[in-house]
Amino acid sequence: MVPEGSRRLSVGIWDPDGPLVRVLADEQVPIAGIRTFRWDSRDGRGQILAHPAHVCRVTIDDRSESRFLMVRYCLAQG
């Protein structure tokens, strides 16, 4: 949840080894409240990432929280 009066919100996807692979949000004076961001398992150039493990980091002002993600790929048959 983004608190009222927040000055900046950023949401990024990182490789477990450390490099940033995608920025989902980088907002000055973000909208307060519960926010939802979707990620399509692609990097910033639109390429699907081969490794299923990633870290999502949310930063609001000077506070950050990270979560480990495992991506499941489903291949369409047809």
Image (spheres, rainbow, N blue to C red):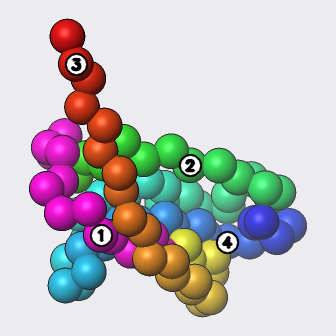
Which of label 2 and label 3 is nearer to you? 3
Name the one closer to the observer, 24 or 48: 48
Query: Which residue was labeled with disc 1?
Result: 53
In the rendered view, does 24 fall on the left or right side of 15? right
- Residue at screen point 74% across, 71% down: 6
- Residue at screen point 20% across, 10% down: 78
Crowding at dot 1, Cα within 10 Å, few <14 / some 14-19 / many 20+, comes out as some
Query: Which residue was labeled with disc 2?
Result: 37
Name the one closer to the observer, 42 or 72: 72
Query: Which residue was labeled with disc 4?
Result: 7
How many angstroms separate mark 2 from mark 3 (CA)? Answer: 28 Å
Q: Main secondary structure of the magenta part?
A: loop
The disc labelled 3 sits on which kind of residue? Gln
Crowding at dot 3, Cα within 10 Å, few <14 / some 14-19 / many 20+, comes out as few
The disc labelled 4 sits on which kind of residue? Arg
Pick whichever of labels 2 and 4 is earlier in the sequence. 4
The disc labelled 1 sits on which kind of residue? Ala
Query: Which residue was labeled with disc 3?
Result: 77
Range of residues picked out in magenta: 45-57
